[in-house]
Structures are given as structure tokens and as C-alpha cells.
Amino acid sequence: MFHVLEHIPDPKSILGELSEMLAGGGQIIVEVPNANDSLLTLYNNSPFSHFTYWSCHLFLYTAKTLQMLIELLKYHSHPAEQKTREIYEIGISHIAFTVDDLDFEYERLKDKGIQFNSPPQLSLDGYAKVTFCRVPEGTLIELVEVL
């Protein structure tokens, strides 16, 4: 169920009905938007907020509330594996955001408990200031101020 459960008026009964149809050892795999996504809770991203909170989403789940629903139905949960990628690894390793005032954003996020790899640093070519942090889910974020 990929981004379906949040649209169902009675998720408990639907999951109960689906479990009765499973063959022995069968699984129901669920993915839902995370109500604690850092784009909502930390960065206050308006487009992402409008997308997440639109009226077609009848329920929003966090890892905790989804776990509670699973336990209520007496299911077993298999926690998702999260791999933290390093900046030097091949493939997508981070997301970069351009900001107008890196020093301001650095202090604002640091005050919210975000840990940075270092304070803002001037790039070797003098084109930008940059710094890196990780959001709670583990994604590496690069903040860039073009000078």
C-alpha cells in the first residue's frame, strides 16, 4: 500500500480485511507520508506543507502512530532499514538548498538543535559559503549562500 492508507476513512477495518486474505506468512507493506517530515517540522516548506495537508489526506501518520495502529491490529512490524550515506559515496548522497543568509540560517537551525559538521565555510574559489547538517531522518543537507 504505497501512499494509500492516509486516504482510507477506516484504516483499521481495511487492514483487518486485507490480513484475512493473506496466505500463510504473507505481508502487507505500507508506506505513508511522515507527519514529522523535516520539510514540515523544521524547514516549514510551504509547497510540501500544502501537498501533505490537502483535504484528501484523512489521516497523517508518524512512525509512532503507525506502530500503534499495527499493534492495535496485533500485527508484527518490521522496522525499515535506514542507511546514512556519506558525501563521498557514489550516487545521491545529499540535498542542497540555496539560502540568502547562511549565517542567519545556521544560527536559527542550531538553536533548534540541529548539529552541523562545521560553521559556514567559504568555498575555495570564494564563490559561496557552505555548511552541512543532517536532518533527523539522516539525510545530509548542504546549505549554500552564493556570494
Image: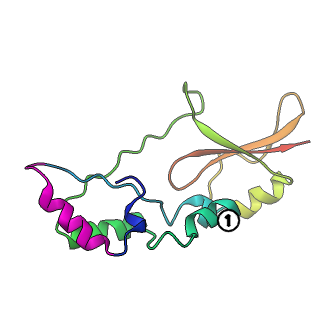
Residue at left 55%, top 46%? 139
Residue at left 57%, top 33%? 92
Q: Is residue 69 visible?
A: yes
Q: Quadrant of residue 144?
A: top right
Which quadrant does the C terminus fall into?
top right
User: Where 63 sits versus 79, above or below?
Assistant: below
Residue at left 12%, top 61%? 20
Judged by its main secondary structure, the magenta piece is helix
Residue at left 37%, top 68%? 64
- From the top left corner, tell me how far across and down residue 89 is, in percent: 54, 27
- From the top left corner, tell me how far across and down residue 3 is, in percent: 43, 57
Q: Is residue 145 left or right of residue 88?
A: right
Q: In which quarter of the image is residue 18?
A: bottom left
Q: Residues within 10 Å of mark 1 (few under 14, many from 20)?
A: few
Most foreground residue, 64 or 24: 24
Start and end of the magenta stretch? Answer: 10-25
Q: Is residue 113 visible?
A: no
Magenta segment includes 12:
yes
- From the top left corner, tell me how far across and down residue 50 is, in percent: 64, 66
- Counting the numbered discs, the total is 1
Residue projecting furthest to the top: 90
Which quadrant does the N terminus fall into?
bottom left
Magenta segment includes 133:
no
Q: Which amino acid does label 1 sit on?
A: Asn
Tag 1 residue? 44
- From the top left corner, tell me how far across and down residue 83 is, in percent: 43, 40
For mark 1, give the secondary structure. loop
Q: Is residue 110 left or right of residue 16?
A: right
Q: Quadrant of residue 40?
A: bottom right
